[in-house]
Image (cartoon, helix red, strand yellow):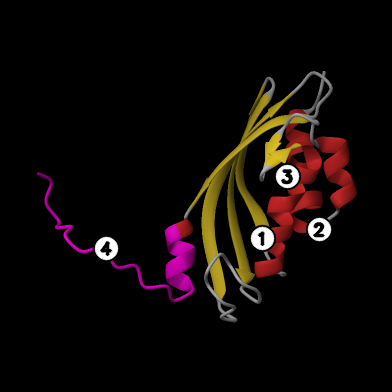
Amino acid sequence: MIDTEAAARRFISDVWNAGREESAYDLIAPDCPGLRGTGPEATLAWHRDRRAAFPDLRYKIVDLVAAGDRVAVHWRAAGTQMGPFGPVPPTGRVVSYSGATFLRFDTTGRIVDVWSVNELFQVLQQLGVEMIPPPGLSGSVA
């Protein structure tokens, strides 16, 4: 029996927090969808991009639920923007936000699916991005 909770915790501690890319090759299946591809390298591409923007980004597990081949993780993250984040140039500002990540494992204990949601608008607001609705939009629904 695979300990999916331990594998999920290792994924967050090693890959997300410590940047131990070699762990991704142990934990992520070759067909796991990632940034513009599949497998460990595609998953790492997303994390490299995020770490380039927020080199000190750290994730803390708030809650974790494991059942069978699936794990749900509620997390909090904080880091300082030292590199570009999409179109936002480096600000030197600290951001703090929450999210949830859902992992599915295969029978060998490797991640075959990762799906995350997070407070992206909160991150952008903390970076000072002004979000203005496009012209012609009103607060009412037609």
* Badge 4 element: loop
**Is residue 136 among what the camera can see?**
yes
Tags 4 and 2 in contact by the CB under 8 Å rule? no
Please report whichever mark, 4 or 1, sits nearer to the chain's N-terminal start.
Answer: 1
Tell me residue 105's x, y (percent): 73, 26
Give the residue pinned by disc 4: 133
Residue type at numbered disc 3: Thr
Which label's residue is closer to the chain start, 3 or 1? 3
x 82%, y 18%: residue: 1
Q: Quadrant of the C terminus?
A: top left
Q: In 3D space, how far apart are the residues under numbered discs 4 and 2 (Cα atoms)?
A: 38 Å
Q: Residue at x 73, y 33 (%)?
A: 5
Q: Which one is in front in this view, the residue at disc 4 or the one at disc 1? A: 4
Name the residue: 58% across, 67% down: 85
Q: Could you give the CA–CA distance between mark 2 and mark 1, rounded to whole angstroms?
A: 13 Å
The tag on residue 122 is none
Instruction: Place residue 11 in its image quadrant.
Output: top right
Helix, strand, or loop for circle 3?
Answer: helix
Pointer 3 with pointer 4, Cβ within 8 A: no
How far is mark 3 from mark 4, CA to CA?
A: 32 Å
What's drawn in magenta, residue-wise? Answer: 121-142
Q: Which mark is residue 50?
A: 1
Q: Percent from the top left, x then y, of residue 129?
A: 42, 73
Closest to the camera, between mark 2 and mark 1, is 1
Identified by mark 2, the residue type is: Ala
Which residue occupies the foreground of this view, 103 or 64?
103
Does residue 82 lie above or below 113 as drawn? below
The stretch drawn in magenta includes residue 131: yes
Q: Which residue is mark 2?
A: 18
